[in-house]
Image: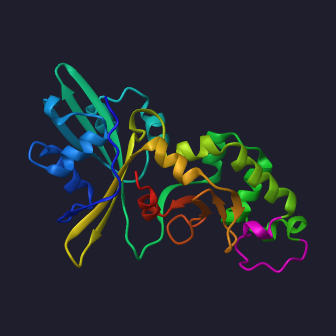
Amino acid sequence: MTTFEVGSTTAKGGFANEKAICAKFNGWKKDKEAQLWLRIMGYNPKEIDSVEAIQIPTRMKRTDAEHLGLKESFEELMKFKKTDAQLRILITIGKIIKVENLSLKKANSDADFNQVDKRRVDTYQEIWKFDNDVALGLKLFTGEINPASQPEIIKGKTLRDKRRMFIDELPESLRQKIMNFFSENRILVVSDILKGRGGLSANWMLVTKYNRNDDTTTWILKDINTVMNFFGSGDVRVSPKGSLYLGKLTVMRKGGTPDPTKLQFKINPCKLFELKK
């Protein structure tokens, strides 16, 4: 396969959702965008016999995984499956079947962030093996542990929110341990957050932005390694609002219902349009 680079592109019509993008891939013989996407993925449309795009359900059943031919244990598959919209694209060339998993992000100019992962701190600790001090600091940050139960940590501080502690309110030792963990394990964390693992890990990210005024869709399609390098690059630092920046990722408390004390990771998908090639 050859590499075919293209920057962001604007096309007529709206196709900023997974159902519409599936339809474009399945109509690849006549669809110019789908042909361009296939070329970006390294395929020559003239050599392709068939393309089948399947929308991956957000909530999967064991039978769904079996239907997709995924071999991992269902529990492992669900642990590392991304919760965002995802397509599985089967490309047949002769007797060879290639599988490409595509992560879809819908971007809005008036919406800065898109959640890419959220879990309980204990789940992240199980996956990433950080120590109990890091876990304690993150649980105080999310409010899973109420600061009032840790008087030796508060030490008479007046907190901005009684339910939790911001990163810049944590004792220096805890704050530094958290930042050191993310700095030293950046590649692992960014990969799990954006790519995932196993049979449903993403190979590509497609960001789409529908422009209602002129009925066009601006899109950019990049391989997942480029995406990880882009969003993962930059310092690990405390944000102005007391959350944490990991490169261009924001690490923050979920808040709201139904799971306010989970840890979540967000990106601004529109930033990917900064990549011009």
Taking the image as shown, residue 92 lies to the left or right of residue 167, namely: left
Measuring from the top left, give residue 169's x and y in whole percent: 79, 70
Using the rendered image of the protein, determine whether residue 260 is visible from the camera's viewpoint: yes
Q: Quadrant of residue 100?
A: top left
Measured along the vertical axis of the image, is residue 273 above or below residue 124? below
In the orientation shown, which residue stands out farthest toward the left? 30
Q: What span is in magenta?
A: 155-170
Taking the image as shown, residue 179 lies to the left or right of residue 43, namely: right
Residue at (86%, 70%) from the top-left corner? 154
Residue at (22%, 68%) from the top-left corner? 216
Please name the colour scheme applied to the rendered image: rainbow
Measuring from the top left, give residue 46's x and y in whole percent: 14, 33
Taking the image as shown, residue 146 lies to the left or right of residue 252, namely: right
Residue at (27%, 72%) from the top-left corner? 211
Measuring from the top left, give residue 165's x and y in whole percent: 74, 70
Measuring from the top left, give residue 132's x and y in whole percent: 77, 47
Taking the image as shown, residue 250 lies to the left or right of residue 34, namely: right
**Does residue 156 show up magenta in the picture?**
yes
Image quadrant in which the N terminus is located: top left
**Does residue 177 show up magenta in the picture?**
no
In the orientation shown, which residue stands out farthest toward the top? 95
Measured along the vertical axis of the image, is residue 2 above or below residue 246? above
Residue at (40%, 50%) from the top-left corner? 277
Foreground: 141 or 8?
8
Q: Main secondary structure of the magenta part?
A: loop
Measured along the vertical axis of the image, is residue 94 above or below residue 199? above
